[in-house]
Amino acid sequence: MTQEVLVAIGTRKGLFLASSDGWKVTGPHHPMTDVYAVAIDTRGEKPRVLAGVTSEHWGPSVAVSDDLGQTWEEPDHAPVAFPEDTGATLGRVWQLAPGPADQPDVVYAGTEPSALFRSTDGGRTFELVRGLWDHPHRKDWFPGFGGQAVHSVIPHPTDADHVTVAMSTGGVYRTTDGGATFHPSNSGIKAYFLPDPFPEYGQCVHKIAQHPSRPDRFYAQNHHGVYRSDDGGTTWKSIADGLPSDFGFPIVVHPHDPDTVYTFPLVADGHRFPPDGRCRVYRSRDAGETWEALDNGLPKTPYWTTILRDAMCVDNADPAGVYFGSRSGDVYGSRDGGDTWVRIAENLPDVLSIRAAVV
């Protein structure tokens, strides 16, 4: 039986939802808001959709739906807010990440400015994780081109005390004591723009991904550089050979195979479009040792748009689906691991974030 998949698409003008049943698209939900973060939490009896919305008038918030977007819960208070003593103001929520399966009410939020928040009520209220905010390195983290934000939050699938985050700029940090302390985890990741190209911290990591069945396996797309770690992020090695460029934003791992990974290369930081103007997803089936270009069903005409860091994802179906959305408003999906693609939405606003799950 074919599994029905929901694809949640965050854009600069609201959230759109696409169903694999004919790829029907609804929306915009939360119109005229930036939706930089979206999550589909499938740990409970029914899936929950969470959206990090930012209104120019009302500011940032988190909206929750337990009926696949038919109705939304959006509190009149700020669910994510910095305590007064920090002197900080929330810019936006960049990431929403459900916690491990044995903590079904835990949800994490990564924010701008760079901070980590934790919810114990399914994403309705959040508290600041002080261990990262009070880190002595924080004074040296500085904004990248897109801002100063925690954009990757990866809870360990079985160890609730272990969470890995990444930020631009600052790099990768890990906690193994439930957020009391965090330690930089960037050995081997290059920061070519710094006097010391291999510093302890300060890297502009664009995105990291982990495979839940092999939690020591991580992948990273850096500001020039693609990496793999086989020791939980302690050390990293380059896997960029075979790609047309080592610059890009997203990186995602196949839901069932820790050796299969996807990325979307761009020419360079100064030329943010695909090499040769060709729309191609790159897949490795051997943990980055070799790469293949995937374009069956993708546009053959010149393609000069960008895929942002959270605008590519996989679902949890079998066979696995892969999805990406562009800044020009097109969304493509593959229900066979990337072998063939179809366009599932077009002419949307800039796609900022995308998540998919069997519902």
Image (cartoon, rainbow, N blue to C red):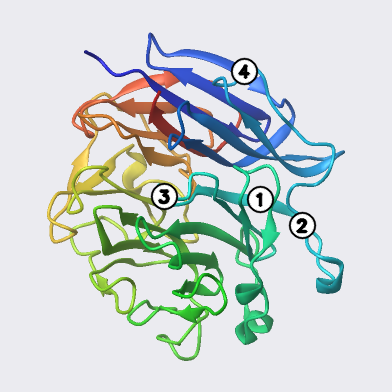
Can you identify the residue that label 4 sits on? 27
Quadrant of image for the C terminus:
top left
Kindly identify the residue that appears in the image at 87 percent across and 38 percent down.
57
Closer to the eye: label 3 or 1: 3
Kindly identify the residue that appears in the image at 27 percent across and 42 percent down.
255
Q: Is mark 4 on a helix, strand or loop?
A: strand
Distance, label 2 to label 1, CA atoms, is 8 Å
> How many numbered badges does the structure rendering display?
4
Amino acid type shown at disc 3? Asp
Extreme-bottom residue of the structure: 196
Disc 2 and disc 1 in contact, CB within 8 angstroms: yes
The reply, left or right, for residue 176 in relation to residue 106 is left
Kindly identify the residue that appears in the image at 47 percent across and 43 percent down.
306
Closer to the eye: label 2 or 3: 3
- Who comes first in sequence, dot 4 or dot 3? 4
**Observer-nearest of 132 and 8:** 132
Residue 93's tag is: 1
- Who comes first in sequence, dot 2 or dot 4? 4
Can you identify the residue that label 2 sits on? 90
Q: Where is residue 25 in the image (x, y as percent from the top left)?
A: 51, 15
The image quarter containing residue 224 is bottom left
The reply, left or right, for residue 136 in relation to residue 290 is right
Amino acid type shown at disc 2? Leu
Q: Position of residue 146 (x, y in %)?
A: 62, 58
The image quarter containing residue 45 is top left
- Who comes first in sequence, dot 2 or dot 3? 2
Q: What element carries label 3?
A: loop
